[in-house]
Image (cartoon, rainbow, N blue to C red):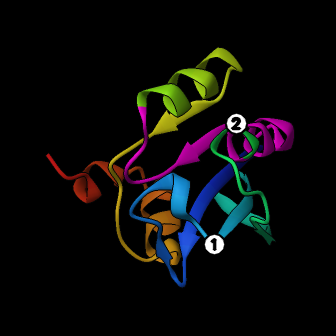
Amino acid sequence: MTILAIPNFGKRISPRIDYAENLNIITVESKKVIKKESIKILVHSYLERINLIIRIKPDIVICDGISDLTFNKLKENNIKVIPWIHGKVDEVVKDYLNNNLETKKIN
């Protein structure tokens, strides 16, 4: 079982993790989504936002823009980060399940 955390703004991945309205928590097992939930991000400080994600304990964070501080804090807490991914959350999850996230990256 893998838990994904995807910061979103509307139906799309948030352009910056620090401006996301919500955090989608998606549980995946055997390449299938078995549970989806959305958490409204009500914290105001940057560090509170990082700590919220760490407390949720996802295995992977899929996001677009991310600061070095956030990236490093997540990695220190054994959370894999897949940055620079953009698009609609549902499409990105589908690409993740099909091992096609590289096509979504901005390089």
SS for callout 2: loop
Q: Is residue 32 magenta?
A: no
Which quarter of the picture shows residue 58? top right
Whether residues under marks 2 and 1 lie with C-beta atoms below 8 angstroms apart, the answer is no
Q: Nearer the viewer, residue 97 or 10?
A: 10
Residue at the spot of label 1: 21
Neighbour tally class for label 2: few under 14, some 14-19, many 20 plus, Cα within 10 Å? some
Range shown magenta: 49-67
The structure residue drawn at horizontal position 59% and vertical position 58%, both measured from the top left corner, is: 6
What's the amino acid at mark 2? Asp
Q: Nearer the viewer, residue 107 or 68?
A: 68
Of marks 2 and 1, the one in the foreground: 1
The vertical placement of 41 against 53, above or below, is below
Q: Position of residue 48 (x, y in %)?
A: 76, 43
Neighbour tally class for label 1: few under 14, some 14-19, many 20 plus, Cα within 10 Å? some
Residue at the spot of label 2: 59
**In the image, 56: left or right of 60?**
right
Screen quadrant of the C terminus:
top left
First-in-chain label (2 vs 1) = 1
SS for callout 1: loop
What's the amino acid at mark 1? Glu
Q: Is residue 65 magenta?
A: yes
The structure residue drawn at horizontal position 19% and vertical position 52%, both measured from the top left corner, is: 106
